[in-house]
Amino acid sequence: MTKRPARINSAVPVTDVNEERERLAAAAARVPGADWQRWGPYLSERQWGTVREDYSPKGDAWDYFPYEHSVARAYRWGEDGLLGWTDRQCRLCFSVALWNERDAHLKERLFGLTNGEGNHGEDVKEAYFYLESTPTHSFARALYKYPQAAFPYQRLREESRRRSRNEPEFELEDTGAFADGRYFDVEAAYAKAGPEDICIQITITNRGAERARLHVLPTLWFRNTWIWGCRHDGCERKPSLRAAAKARPGVVEAEHESLGRFFWEAAPDPVTGVAPELLFCDNETNAQKLFGPGASNASAYPKDAIHAAVVDGRRDAVNPARRGTKVAAHHVLDLAAGESRILSVRLCAADAPSANEAAGKVFAARAAESAAFHATLPGLRGATPEAAAVARQAYAGLLWSKQFYHYVVEDWIRGDAEQPAPPPGRDQVRNGDWKHLFARDILSMPDKWEYPWFAAWDTAFHMLPMARVDPAFAKDQLNLLLREWYMHPNGQMPAYEFNFSDVNPPVHAWACWRVYKLSGERGGRDREFLARVFKKLLINFTWWVNRKDPSGRHLFAGGFLGLDNIGVFDRSKPLPTGGHLEQADGTAWMAFYCGTMLAMALELAETEPGYEDIASKFFEHFIMIADAMNTVGGTGLWHEEDGFYYDQLLDGQGRARPMRVRSMVGLIPLFAVEFIDEARLDALPGFAKRTRWFMKNRSDLSAQITYMAESAKCAGRHMLAIPSRERLVRLLRYVFDEAEFLSPHGVRSLSRRHAEAPFVLEAGGERHEVRYVPGDSDTWLFGGNSNWRGPVWLPLNYLLIESLERYHHFYGDDFKVEVPTGSGVWMTLGEAAAELSRRVSSLFLPDAEGRRPALGAERPAWATGDADRDLVLFHEFFHGDDGRGLGASHQTGWTALVTELLR
């Protein structure tokens, strides 16, 4: 039986009524016949090289299932494809395959380097862009650029292996693959005529100066569940694809036990009138090809048979009976320079009209509805054309990065009944303590190629912009990760696929609270959602307190906390010095968590008085953590001479040593800021009585923290924050100093002063150094290609901007900071937040010369025409000096936060 979360009350707030919002409301209410989100871009962009597909003895996921195997080897837990589409349980999949008559195999999926092949870790080596999507995916477009010369697979690998960590990554455009426009633009557009009726247009454009041939193969297949004896897919019988009657040459009938019956039609070439040839095979492993002639194949026509027929010219490789579980419609296009051709496909649950009939009207209507919907969104309403183009693509990437994610840990560890058992000791490889985890859902991915698996703290940030377009999905996602088949029985949330037991920053409560407030105007918000998540967050909060405060002093050590490479040591492992670390970020994150839980409890107490006691608990706990951070041992984690918060190393005798690294670790204490109004105290007498008693009897706590200070701007408002006003002033001098944290494009993760003055510690017989590195990491230390030693990261910049706005809301216009420090320009904290938003947004916007910092100083090689001028990539992080995009190139999960800043 499939486990699914209970549907939360998730009415869509309608401020601008249009067709797409009406579809969203119908889907959220589960109106019969209105399941507009059953189909979407839920197909992964990389299934090979993932933990789910790894059955190796030592957990070598990249090597166990390499890219080369993906052509001929059936997947166990999912599927992948190019510009693809599938249903929400990934039963029937569609994508585009290509061949330029020069490659050694069909281009069926994106290529990239594994963690061991790239000089900065794993990295996709393709040019592709998400252009548009509505939240129901009633209209969606994406673009892929395919070289006309042979794809340089081997050169990309060899040059990347040759380069050192100190050299930039070798990208596809560096090979000359796009020189003189010698490539094809391949745009896949989807428009739904109904919830079960999908019109597809594949537009091919020859961008080169000479005529060129291209094989285009729209492909349909069933995910292989039958070979594994899967128990969770509602399908005991093998599904089937078969050609329809000869009078309908491009039509295929699809039958699936739980999905039902569908018809798929690939229309003739609109110019030549030639119908595509249908090529059938089975989505089964070609074991003989991969493992030698001694292996046996489950089908005479395995997964790579279409490749063999087209690329190798072996027409007998495909099933002459024209049936199977995978089919491709083979078009051969001969395009003049600059010529475009549109190929039409249709997938529908009924025997609908032909793929071409009425499709034009469907596309026109859905495109207009998409435009009307997007015009209402933050970052687009009233925006300049340049900003609107950025926001539209950011939302598109966010929506295209929804993916079917299937991982049942118990089955993965035990193995399938009809397959060879996994190696002994498999539960010791990874995730052995997560046998309860049962994932079979549509999840928001950080990046569908580089991170085709959920990461809990990424998801939290994704859901803010997601709540602008689809609040129901945002709430369901946040609630889902707290459900009993995700959250550990001990209260820990799963971190990410490679290690569910790792520790991410506790930002989930903050995301739930923000999404709740976005769900409607005050008085009309989704309190059922808030109550559901709050009760489960209580369990998670208790896990944090019990596991991550080893001394019981309200000072926390949570491990690396998502900030790879930022510390002196790997903070997830035993320290080479012995002793333990008290973390400024871990402690501040817990104060942040406390403050958010306090705000949620006070909100719920308005209608349920029982929450008043819980609010009092979080009120007092916040103050205890803030006090410990500022005063334990004298000054806590605050360094009075430097005016900064640092991690603190305690040796075996309890002696403390500050790790004087000026990094984002010391700025996270700024995030923990909450308000309490007198009006709320008056409305909650139980909470008010306890709070006023605490204020009277623990007045000693107000010395170095902002403890129920009264606002000069808003009468009757009190604030809780970690730093006192004087300490806030000192911290902000560093934040806005261009020689320290402030870059042209946001706040750096490490102070620039460490370029000239690196922090050095001799310990364990080794030299440990932290030095400012504005770009990709120059070391393999604890983090792969992640780097928090200089670059700009959007999520923490966003939290800092939000905190500055909140401080301004309390202190008002009388509190000003110099931006940049030493410039003589003084701004209110609200103006400083706006300036920081402007700097971060400038990463994606064209400058006076038309260059976008995130895309580098030179016009990208794939940008050969005016149509490419607005194309943007949304990277994982950005160079601390020049703003170049680095890391994963399609991280329109947390990088989609730019839509909030463009407002």
Image (cartoon, rainbow, N blue to C red):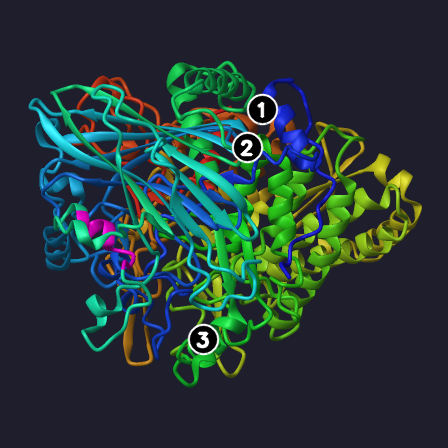
Nearest to viewer (mark 2 / mark 3)? 3
- Answer with left or right where residue 703 lies relative to residue 184: right
Over which residues does the magenta segment extend? Answer: 301-309
Q: Which mark is residue 471?
A: none
- For this rendering, which residue is in front, 80 or 120? 80
Which of the two discs, 2 and 3, labels the residue nearer the N terminus?
2
- Answer with left or right where residue 384 lies relative to residue 332: right
Residue highlighted by disc 1: 20
Q: Secondary structure at mark 3?
A: loop
Which of the two discs, 1 and 2, labels the residue nearer the N terminus?
1
Q: Residue at x 33, y 54 (%)?
A: 787
Position of residue 104 measured from the top left corner of the image (x, y, whole percent): 12, 50
Quarter where residue 246 is shown = top left
Residue highlighted by disc 3: 418
Residue highlighted by disc 2: 136
Which of the two discs, 3 and 1, labels the residue nearer the N terminus?
1
- For this rendering, which residue is in front, 154 or 659? 154
Q: Are marks 1 and 2 in contact (CB under 8 Å)?
A: yes
Task: Rate crowding at label 1 as few (under 14), some (14 to 19) or many (20 or more) other CA atoms within 10 Å.
Answer: many
What amino acid is at disc 2?
Answer: Thr
Quarter where residue 839 is shown = top left
Quarter where residue 97 is shown = top left
